Structure formats: C-alpha cells, structure tokens
Amino acid sequence: MKTLTERQQTILRLAVRTHIETGLPVASKTLVERFDLDLSPATVRHELAALDEAGYMVQLHTSAGRIPTEAGYRYFVQRLVGEFELPVDQRQMIRHQFHQARLDLDQWMRLSAAVLARASQGASIVTAPRPLQNRFRHLQLISTQGRLALLVLVLFGGEVKQQMLTLAEPLPQSRLSAVTDRLNSLFEGLSQADIAARLSQLDDRLEEEVARLTVDIIRRADGRTISDFHRDGLANIVDDEGARQAVRVLEERSLLSSVLTETLTPEVSGVQVVIGGEGRWEELKDCAIIVSRYGLEQQLAGVVAVVGPTRMPYGRNISAVRYVASLMSGFVYDYYMDLPQLAEPEG
C-alpha cells in the first residue's frame, strides 16, 4: 500500500464512512460540513485529488465528488476501520436465541445464518463444522456375495464412507472380521498420512489391501471442497450492481466453495475480509466477503461469512461475524466434546 499522511488517512476514513452511509460521491465541502473539519474545502479537495492519484478514490465525473476504489476499501479495512463491538443488548439477544436452539446442529446452522443476515443487513453463509484433517475411527468389512465385500469406514466427526471391495477369493465373515479387528486396533485416531506410514507393519496381504483403500478414501475426504451451505438474507442485497454481483457469487457454488475452503486452512485465523477478489477471484469484483473460521483449533472447523457489495458497514459486520463465530466455536466444543456451556465470549 502507498504511504499516506495522517491527514490523508483521516480524510480517506471519513470519505469511506460517508460513502458507505449515503451511497453518494463524496465532495470536499460535504466532508468539511459533515465532520466540522478545521480545514478549508480547497485543502480537502487537494487531499482527495492526492488519494485519487494514489488509487484509493476515483472521480466518476469532472464536477462530481469521489467514491472509494477497491484499494481504498482495503486500506480502510486494514488500517482505518478501528475497533467496533455489537451493542450489549444485541449480543444478549443473539446469545439468547442460540441458547434456545440447544445442542441441535441443524438449528444452529440455520439460526447463525439468520442472525448474521439480520445483524449485517446483508447475505450470510454458514457451513457445518468438518474435520480439518479426517481421522480413522472404525472400519468394518461385510461379506456380501462371492468375492465382493462392503467396506464401511467411520471417521471422527461421524462421517461414514462405503466402498465395495473385490477380494482375491471368497472369504468367510470371520476372516474379514479378524482383519478389521486388527486394523481398528492399529489405526484408531490416525490421519491418512499416519496410516500410510504404518503400511510396512502389515504382513497380511488382505490387511494391506484394505489399509491402502482406507488411505485413499480418507485422502479423498480431506481433499473435498465445501459443498453444503446455509444461506440467508438474499433479499437484503438487491439494490445496486455490487449487490447483484454478490447474489451471483452466492449462486455460484464452485466459486463460493473455493473462497470458503481457502479460509479453512490452518494458516488462516481470525476474521478475513476479501474485497473485490483481491486479485484472486475476478468474479468478486464489486463484492466483499467477511469470513471467519469457527470450531476447535486443528480439529473441527466451519465458516461463517457475510457477503455484500463493497459499500457495506465493515465495522459492524466484522464484529457480527467475529461474535457469531465465537458462539459457534462454543457450540462445537459443547456438541462434540460434551462439556458444559461456555461463558460469554469477548466481542
């Protein structure tokens, strides 16, 4: 980012705030009068021109005011937005709604999407928690007919995978059960990489074949993109081009999956703000996504997000996403770890 003076930062912050609130181009006289600045309109106009030259503002017409560019919004979010917390009464209302849902995963998904849409006046996305790295829980081989057997693999988190296996020769169920008993004792709680590292310990050909198939199934599960979204608030974003583009983003499942899957990587933490695609997703032009992971660190995680036009109230929406993510993390802890309710989260 280009270096701005303290005065230029102040004017950019006020200009972005004004444009977000009014939707109109911002003129120097407007800023002086609205914020009672101890500056002349000519001085503010000069600084707005400097911000234009730096790429943070743009003048659509010679005689008109200026509006923020995507770079201007990014500078605002990263350096100027400041700390913002949802009002106490709003947080208490949200928390009360979540308590009423109790420990029901589907209710929490729907509720969190509705709460985010209402708090942000935008569109919301929530994904169910899933393992960051799938781990082996239990395996079963079931004899079906002839040389065919059904492999049933249960992963931590409860996901069940099934696949048919063609045996070298017909085998009794007792033999298949003996194989799975041994593999269950060796592999419980392991990732696909851990299992692959232990293949050399297997001296039984069938055990090795089943283990290799298990590794392949878990590897495919690890590489799966997010496909199940809970969405709410589409009716909130229909009034300008950025909003219409946001609706298209919400309807393009593969793009949405790509953006949200990237936020699930262990290296990414906290609330992330993606404005205009950040040079990675051209389809996000004129859109912004505020997104956060929730869940158990390095174990189970999901995503909560708000999607809307670049002209959105970033402070409020960042706070709403952060707060709902903290509540959802508490839910995951309670739901999967069977522990008492967590205390009031911060922010």
Image (cartoon, grey):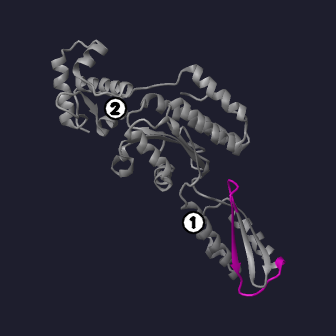
Are the residues flagged by discs 1 and 2 in contact, CB closer than 8 Å? no
Label 2 sits on what residue type?
A: Phe
Q: Is residue 58 left or right of residue 337?
A: left
The residue labelled by disc 1 is 220
Location of residue 181 (image quadrant): bottom right
Q: Which mark is residue 84?
A: none
How many numbered circles does the render carry? 2
State the residue at coordinates (67%, 27%).
96
- On whether residue 171 falls in the magenta region, the answer is yes
Q: Position of residue 50 (x, y in %)?
A: 17, 30
Q: Nearer the viewer, residue 283 or 79?
A: 283
The residue labelled by disc 2 is 76
Q: Is residue 159 above or below residue 311?
A: below
Location of residue 103 (image quadrant): top right
Q: Is residue 271 left or right of residue 141?
A: left
Q: Nearer the viewer, residue 252 or 94?
A: 252
Q: How many neighbours does mark 2 have within 10 angstroms: few (below 14), some (14-19), or many (20 or more)?
A: many
Q: Nearer the viewer, residue 238 or 180?
A: 238
Q: How many neighbours does mark 1 have within 10 angstroms: few (below 14), some (14-19), or many (20 or more)?
A: few
Q: Position of residue 294 (x, y in %)?
A: 57, 42
Which secondary structure, mark 2?
A: helix
Q: Is residue 266 in sight in this rendering?
A: no
State the residue at coordinates (39%, 47%).
284
Label 1 sits on what residue type?
A: Arg
Q: Is residue 190 in sight in this rendering?
A: yes
Residues in magenta, as a range: 154-174
Location of residue 28 (image quadrant): top left
Which secondary structure, mark 1?
A: helix
Q: Is residue 182 left or right of residue 269?
A: right
Q: Is residue 297 above or below residue 181?
A: above
Q: Position of residue 215 (x, y in %)?
A: 61, 69
**In the displayed image of the protein, which residue is found farthest to the bottom?**
169
